[in-house]
Image (cartoon, rainbow, N blue to C red):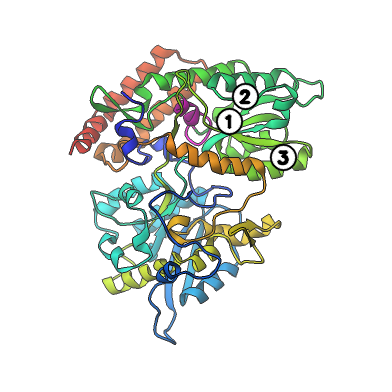
Amino acid sequence: MQRQSKASLLLSVAIVAGLLAGCAGKDEGNGGASPSAGNESPKAGGSPSASAEASKPAEEPKNADPVKITIMLPLNIAETPPDTIKNEVEKLTNTKLTYQFFPADTYEEKLNAALATGALPEVTYLKNQSTFIQMKGAIRDGQFWEIGPYLSEFPNLSKLKPRILDNTKVDGKLYSLYIGRPLARQGLIYRKDWADKLNLKAPETVDDLVAMAKAFTEKDPDGDGKPNTIGLADRNDLVYGAFKTIASWFGTPNNWGEKDGQLQPDFTFPQYVQAMDTMKQIRDAKAMNQDFAATSKTDQVALFTSGKAGLYIGAMSDIDSLNKDLLKNVPTAVVDTQALIKGPDGQLSTWAIPGYNNVVLFPKSAIKDEARLKEILAFFDKMMTPEVANMMFWGIEGTHYTVVDGKAKVSDDKERTEREVKGYKDSVIGESETNGMYEGYYTLEGRIRAEQFALENEKIAIHDPAAALDSPTYTEKGQELQNLITDATYQYIYGKIDKAGFDKAVEQWRSRGGDKIVEELNAAYKK
């Protein structure tokens, strides 16, 4: 069977909880999804066109009172942003907005407490895809408004991508708007200056990657005569760290794949074991941080930016912040990106996310009637105009960004931009194709290459055939069961269990409810 047969028909939803954790909008430098055929929409900038004018919502009566809206959302920076952007958005949308920011690390606790006490505000952002899955029970209980029937009444909301909306439906009904993200931007960020010194070209195969990790560890790439470098810096995340991307280069299914006419979880496929073997090979060679299963992203980043490690596998858009902080410590360093890495069979593949990283819901406890719901949806319709989307995503032109070649170039004062804009940026609905906001302008060669790699990755992306499917047993036990596989994967890579030990963990997964999940998903898949 071709690697991307039925699996390529649907976008990925993170049905395995381990896949989902950690995607709480911490996407550095993301300029929205890349343009794709069949999704034409006006871009901001330049002289207004007829299509751009058509994207504007109907004008309100003059002197209409501002619409008051309360919004709860996670905060992915250290401090609550000032009202700089909020004040401008209020002017553009004729609203009076109250933002309730809560730290992302404890956001789920706050969310659950507010849900239990009926204290959710009118607009409730979740934390990530995992939180969305956990919220499906409350959605099914009728605690949130179904909004699908209303989108056609709003010219800009109706532009949201149907395939991504389908991935957020619950039992075939739409309750949420989505925050868009590129489909497949995972790849390799590496020290090009180290590679050049050691006469190594950018890795083209997984074997090349392993060889580079070993060379960066053993051959003194920083030239100080000391054995103080390693190849790969990784963290305690099997999804957004190195493992899932390496596994996808082997052709491992994305969460679920078809085997013998049935959907089965990715960890039951031989390619998953090949990926564990590769990670074990790198770790056994001491070519990565030995305690990666207990390493935070902050510490992983520090390994790279301090000049100790030379390889980082994750979102290629991370190159901007990694490069900036690395140059503070190693001014002569040069970084680059690489993707399209072949597995042993010579084929190219990578994994895709479902096109969003978070959603927003509308609680019935706070929104009492249809008229009020439409009032709030009208605000989001305005958010999806280029003027408002740019304000929330990029900030104030001339202060937080400038326009270069029709794209947004972030100000050199990146600390100010993050402090004042980031909190709002993470809440923008849609993506550049649908809301018309500027795409990013980049000068770092590695980032420019990363944007091109993201486009190429989409062509070879492995999607999840269980993207829009539900399993009651997964909702109840999925995270607990996934922990079995996560622990076994780490133990295998650490050499604490062998293949027989890993297979035993898989059997435990099946006997404790996994087989029921397989049964339920296949029943839904065949409908």
Image side of residue 513 versus residue 321, left or right: left
Counting other residues with Cα less than 10 Å from the Cα at mark 2, is it few (<14), some (14-19), or many (20 or more)?
many
Q: Is residue 361 visible?
A: no
Residue 142 vertical position relative to residue 513 in the rendered view, above or below: below
Please report whichever mark, 2 or 3, sits nearer to the chain's N-terminal start: 2
Residue type beneath disc 3: Leu
Counting other residues with Cα less than 10 Å from the Cα at mark 1, is it few (<14), some (14-19), or many (20 or more)?
many
Task: Identify the residue shown where x is 43% and y is 86%.
Answer: 62
Which residue position is annotated with label 2?
A: 288
Percent of width and height locating residue 5: 31, 30
Residue 17 vertical position relative to residue 118 in the rendered view, above or below: above
Which residue position is annotated with label 3?
A: 326
Q: Is residue 151 visible?
A: yes
> Is residue 362 rendered magenta in the image?
no
Percent of width and height locating residue 464: 35, 36
Percent of width and height locating residue 64: 42, 84
